Amino acid sequence: MIEQGSESCRSCPEKHKCQEIYEELGKAKGPSVALKVVAAFLVPLVVFIVSLAIFERISAKMVNAKALQTAISCLLALSVTFVCILVIKAAYEHQRKRKLQ
């Protein structure tokens, strides 16, 4: 937020209304974004961690070289996470299109 003593505020014709404007923005009603935040950040993170653990166990039985196990597990976990992100984006896009109709 810009301080009232800054150059931008001194030259602003609306400087006396800043507090009112921010109060009105704080009162704005709208849909909660909590579910979108969880879907966008938490779900992919959990998917990555869980899939990394699963692929690490699987690759430990199939590959002898530890460095190769880690690389394979990480690439597979990233792939699964990428697919998860695409599914989330497609679901929200579908939901958005349905709301517009």
Image: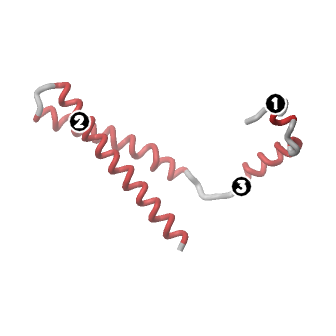
As drawn, 38 above or below 64: below
Toward the top, the furthest residue is: 66
As drawn, 90 above or below 7: below
For disc 1, the marked residue is 6
Q: Amino acid at mark 2?
A: Ser
Q: Which mark is residue 59?
A: none
Which residue: 10% across, 35% down? Answer: 62
Q: Amino acid at mark 3?
A: Ala
Residue 76: x, y in percent? 25, 41
Residue 85: x, y in percent? 39, 50
Along the horizontal axis of the image, is 88 left or right of 50? right
> How far, Cα to Cα, is label 2 from label 1?
52 Å
Q: 41 or 14, which lies in front? A: 14
Q: Which mark is residue 28?
A: 3
Which residue: 54% across, 50% down? Answer: 34
Residue 60: x, y in percent? 15, 32
Along the horizontal axis of the image, is 64 left or right of 6? left
Q: Nearer the viewer, mark 2 or mark 1?
A: 1
Residue 47: x, y in percent? 34, 44
Q: 64 or 2, which lies in front? A: 2
Mark closest to the chain's N terminus, 1 or 3: 1
Tag 2 secondary structure = helix
- Report if the CB atoms under discs 2 and 1 are less than 8 Å apart: no
Badge 1: few (under 14), some or many (20 or more) residues near its Cα, within 10 Å? few
For disc 2, the marked residue is 73
- Tell me the quarter of the picture where residue 45 sits: top left
